[in-house]
Amino acid sequence: MTHNRKMAWEGCGCAACVAPSDCRTLVLPRRRFLAAGAATALAGGAMLAARPARAQTTLGPDAALERLMAGNARFVASDLHSFRDDLDVLKAGTVDKQEPFAAVLSCADSRVPVELVFDQSIGHVFVTRVAGNVATTEMIASLEYGAAVLGTPVIVVLAHQGCGAIKAAVGGKAVPGQISALYAPLQAAVEQGHHDYEATARINARIQADLLATASPVLSGLIGEGRLKIVAGYYSLDTGTVSLLA
């Protein structure tokens, strides 16, 4: 096995430096650990080994969702573990393949950085983004690929606080260009939310999750086989918390 950096795998039999779940220790050279936006100096020349990449698609739907939510708890606590991942290993191991353990249909809003919100890194989450997190044909096709080809066992439709697409759809005012094309897929949520922004955002996430689960024979088939779960969630900008919606 050839590496760009000096590494020693103990008991590793995986390809492209990506260790499966039964791989053991990755010994790495001296490095610094970047955490929560600031470099932390390691006193006395201490060393911190980066975490090896793990196989993703061995997880079931419940375990995958649990991993996502655990990552969000770390994000809320400003204790991001993903910064400990060795990026050289992750990049090398995902050149020829990807094995994301979850997929997210998120709004395009810049305040919702999906990987950070769930404390994940390269190759971990299959992310699709569009204003209003609506399940358009293109989004459904992408998520079908993620579930059927890549094996992602969970899809989260992630709404968020202060969504501009929701506010525009609720207001129903004239807008430039093709922005109004978002109004139609959001209209059912606007009506059910009685023109309340945050209620509409939550309702829309549920509607889009249900659409994914029922309108796509590919996704509904995987759900029926117990290989996929689709859930709706809501991200609070002020707290950083993701809440799952019943």
Image: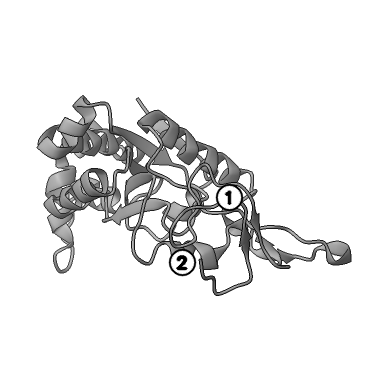
Q: Which mark is residue 35?
A: none
Q: Which amino acid does label 2 sit on?
A: Lys
Q: Which amino acid does label 1 sit on?
A: Gly
Tag nearer the camera, 1 or 2:
1
In the structure shown, which secondary structural element does the residue marked by tag 1 occupy? loop
In terms of depth relative to the viewer, which is nearer, 129 or 5? Answer: 5
Name the residue: 40% across, 61% down: 110
Q: To which residue does mark 2 refer?
A: 91
The percent coordinates of residue 104 (x first, y second) are 34, 47
Up/down of 149 relative to 180, above or below: above
Find residue 8 and report its image quarter.
bottom right
Q: Distance between the residues labelled 1 and 2?
A: 21 Å
Q: In this view, does 44 lie to the left or right of 40?
A: right
In terms of depth relative to the viewer, which is nearer, 83 or 192? Answer: 83
Name the residue: 22% across, 26% down: 225
**Furthest residue toward right:** 44
Find residue 49 and report its image quarter.
bottom right
Q: To which residue does mark 1 refer?
A: 11
The percent coordinates of residue 188 (x first, y second) are 16, 36
The percent coordinates of residue 101 (x first, y second) are 39, 44
* Sequence-first disc among 1 and 2: 1
Name the quadrant of the C terminus: top left
In terms of depth relative to the viewer, which is nearer, 176 or 92? Answer: 92
Q: Is residue 181 left or right of residue 29?
A: left
Circle 1 Cα neighbour tier, 10 Å, few/some/many (<14 / 14–19 / ≥20): few
Up/down of 60 relative to 32, above or below: above
Q: Report whether residue 216 is seen.
A: no
